[in-house]
Image (cartoon, rainbow, N blue to C red):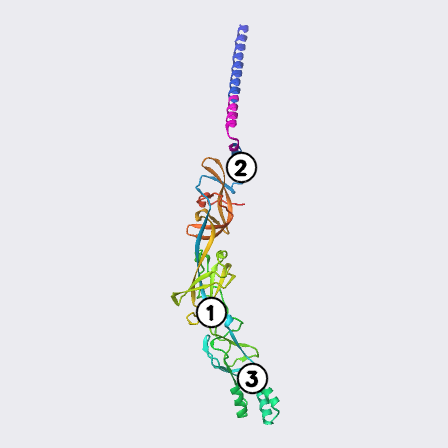
Amino acid sequence: MNRRKNKIQLCYWSFLLAGLLLSNGCNNQSEHSGHESMNHDKHNMPNHEMKKNDTIDLKSISLPTNYSVISSQKTVKPAWSESNTTISANGYIAVDERRDNKISARFSGRIEKLFVKYNFQYVNKGEKVMEIYSAELNTVQEELLFLLKNKSENELVKKAEEKLKLMGVSDSQLKEIEVTGKTLYSTSVLSSYDGYVYFTNTNAPSLQIPTTHPSQMGGMGVSSNSSSNQPMNTSTLQIREGSYVNKGQTLFKVNDLKEVLGIVLIDNSHSSEISVGTDIELTSELDRDDIIKAKINLLEPVLQNGQKFLSARIYLNNESGLLKINSLLTAKVNSVKTKQLLIPNSSILFLGGRSIVWVKTGEPEKGKYIFQAQNITKGVSQGNMAEVTSGLTDKDEIVFDAGYMIDRESLIKSK
């Protein structure tokens, strides 16, 4: 009975061992067949395609997730464009300081009477503008009268007369002193020029730049704020009756305004498009039907409230007197630009002080692309397109809608 039981157990373990061996052999055969199939497919795959996929996968794994994105977004290529661009800007009329004539005090004294009451009052040559009492001048007059009374040598008398003329005494005033035998209590100061008088305590009028905000420029021009920042200092008179003046002090300036300056402020992004000699068309707010054609005579970079501008200076003929100081100008510059690399505005993502685009760097599988963030420098916008001045070439391929590539918790890094 025990011998029969042992035979049954032996048969059971024999069948179990045979089943395990058979199962292991099938698995090995299946695995061997799979390896053959894989190797066969790998040998049939083109070498350049296999290397390309292997390289892309390696880069995708090694890059941080906030450097690159895998997506199937629509792409576009930057394109070169040749076009004529029109630059619009605003400006104002200012005094041409080259035509300034200074009237200075030739002796110290006190202003007894002032006949010029306001800025830009017109005076004629030889017209009396003020009367000044001067103890210094009276002393020289007394010397002349003493020499005449004592019938001194003519040479001494002539030297005394020349001294008075150098101090601003006119021939008629000198004759009056010699005929009456009395000194003049106050001496009249006459204008030596025809023109408009303006008073100032500095060497030149204060020209200020209108304040603007980038959102007001529209990417093309600069607007002028004439209410808060007057282009020229038109403050009240710096000298008044009863004021004392010093020898050599500039009392006022006279300018005939037959030639004035047009000051036009142009956004700095157009610096590569304009130069000295560029044609410009100006329209005054006082006569919008009259288009003034001129050329830019001087370009000066300026900085105001953190914004860069190009200050264009244009010399304008004003024989007619129609161009008034501080009147506003509208300017238009027709500039021909040879080439611009343009991309859609939607392809640009603005991140504070940076502008980025998503550049296609690979294709791990059909319809799926790897995009990497790339910094660019944006130029002037033209409708729905924007100029790129650096960071891209026409061989690159970028995402059309950059905003779809991130969510609100993404922190984008670029190289």
Residue 21: assigned label: none
Type of the residue with mark 2:
Ile
Label 1: which secondary element: strand
Mark 3 and mark 1: Cα distance apart in space? 34 Å
Q: Position of residue 292 (x, y in %)?
A: 42, 65
Q: Residue furthest bottom?
A: 150
Three-letter code, disc 1: Val
* Label 3 SS: helix
Quadrant for the C terminus in the image: top right
Q: Which residue is mark 2?
A: 61
Please give the residue where the numbered disc 3 appears in the rendered image.
165
Question: Residue 240 vs residue 158: left or right?
Answer: left
Residue 2, given in percent of the width and then of the height, sits at 54, 6
Residue type at numbered disc 3: Lys
Confirm whether the magenta stretch covers residue 43. yes
Q: Earlier in the sequence, mark 3 or mark 2?
A: 2
